[in-house]
Structure formats: C-alpha cells, structure tokens
Amino acid sequence: MTQIVFLPHPEICPEGAVLEAKAGETVLDVALNAGIDIEHACEKSCACTTCHIIVREGFDSLEESDELEDDLLDKAWGLEPESRLGCQAKVGQQDLVVEIPKYTLNQVSEQH
C-alpha cells in the first residue's frame, strides 16, 4: 500500500496524518475516510476548486491532470506547480506528501 502524509493544517488536520491508500483511490477519498474534512463543494465532480491540494512529494507518480482540472486549478487560491484537485488526484505506487492550503475559495461553506 501507498502512504499519504498529510502535513499539519491548523484547522482541518492540526497534527498531520499518515494514511494508507490503495492505488487508484483519490487523495480526497483517502482523507475523508480518515476524518480529514477537506472541503469538496461539488461532491467530487471536478466542478470547483475547494479540494485543492499541493503535492509536496510524489507528484510525478499521479496520473496527469486533464484539461478540465487544469482550467479549474487556474482559479484556486495559492496555486503552485504541484497543485491538484484532491478529487481527481489518484494515488499511484509512490508515497505522497500532501499540503492542504490555508484557504479555499468556497463561497457557500456551511462550516463558517
């Protein structure tokens, strides 16, 4: 199994986490199944940017993003070259280190 290391995030995952993932699972699903509540306003349909993540290690092991994901990422807060949408980033065979950005562009968040 592949490991995903989630770096600490002050609100979503203060202690950070190390999770086991199966190849083909999305980073978002792995996080949600472990109780890491990354926002996902479009219910994982690749229609928003609320599940934006930054893959600090293992980025090249992910399947390439498609044009729709790339277009959406252009609108994400804090975009970096290693940015992906968690709902689209499928785990491969290499361990990942993931950072959840401090902010998200969710105009309808029910948690605030």
Image: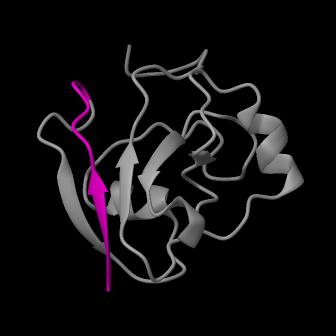
Does residue 109 lie above or below 51 as drawn? Answer: above
Q: At x 18% / y 53%, what residue is drawn?
A: 17
Looking at the image, which is closer to me, 25 or 35?
A: 25
x then y, percent, for residue 14: 15, 33
> Is residue 75 shown left or right of residue 53?
right
Q: Coloured how?
A: one colour
Looking at the image, which is closer to me, 95 or 47?
A: 95
Q: Is residue 13 magenta?
A: no
- Whether residue 90 is visible, yes or no, is no
Q: Is residue 7 magenta?
A: yes
Does residue 6 lie above or below 102 as drawn? Answer: below
x then y, percent, for residue 31: 35, 56
Q: Quadrant of the N terminus?
A: bottom left
- Whether residue 77 is visible, yes or no, is yes
> Is residue 1 shown left or right of residue 26?
left
x then y, percent, for residue 20: 27, 74
The residue most toward the left is 15
Quadrant assignment, res 95? bottom left
Q: At x 38% / y 13%, what residue is drawn?
A: 112
x then y, percent, for residue 26: 52, 66
Q: At x 38% / y 49%, what residue is drawn?
A: 98
Q: At x 25% / y 52%, what residue is drawn?
A: 35
Q: Exactly how many numbered labels are in the figure?
A: 0
> Is residue 68 shown left or right of residue 81?
right
Q: Look at the image and give the residue range highlighted in magenta.
A: 1-11
